[in-house]
Amino acid sequence: MIKVYGMPSCPDCAAVEKQIEGNPEFEYIDIGKDVHALRAFLSLRDSLPVFEELKRGGDVCIPCFVKEDGTVTLDPEEVGLSSEGEKPTKTACSLNGKGC
């Protein structure tokens, strides 16, 4: 099962969540809903080099995908999803105000 870390207020996460709805190959984990989920995500984000470039730019780094083999990617296409899903108009994913 592929774990997807995200939040509903993130337009990219909302688009991914819509794509995986009802798909047993994915587990969506809302990091804003449970402090344990947030802690697990932050542990990944703060320890893996895949996040470094985005963190330097002020990005939160969601949605984040943890594959069954434990590798982490930030690219939905690497897990068979579209990166061009329907997105809400609000943007909330970057500390510098540029959105997701």
Image (tube, grey):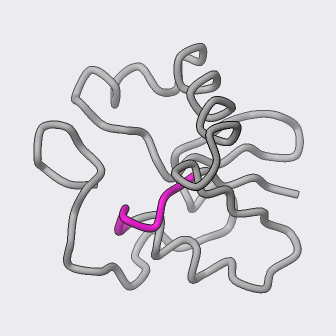
Residue 65 percent location from the top left of the image = 65, 48
The vertical placement of 44 against 16, above or below, is: above
Q: Is residue 6 left or right of residue 36?
A: left
The vertical placement of 83 against 95, above or below, is: below
The vertical placement of 59 against 81, above or below, is: above
**Residue 30, magenta (yes or no):** no
Total labels drawn: 0
Residue 64 percent location from the top left of the image = 57, 46
**Residue beneath the point at 37% across and 38% down:** 60
**Residue beneath the point at 67% across and 56% down:** 29
The vertical placement of 27 against 100, above or below, is: below
Relative to the observer, which residue lies in front, 4 or 71?
A: 4
Asked which quadrant contains residue 2, the reply is: bottom right
Asked which quadrant contains residue 44, the reply is: top right
Residue 50 percent location from the top left of the image = 52, 26
Residue 43 percent location from the top left of the image = 63, 22
**Residue beneath the point at 37% across and 62% down:** 10
User: The C terminus appears in which quarter of the rendering?
Assistant: bottom left
Q: Is residue 47 left or right of residue 14?
A: right
Predominant secondary structure, magenta span: loop
User: The N terminus appears in which quarter of the rendering?
Assistant: bottom right
Q: Which residues are magenta?
A: 6-11
**Residue beneath the point at 82% across and 34% down:** 70
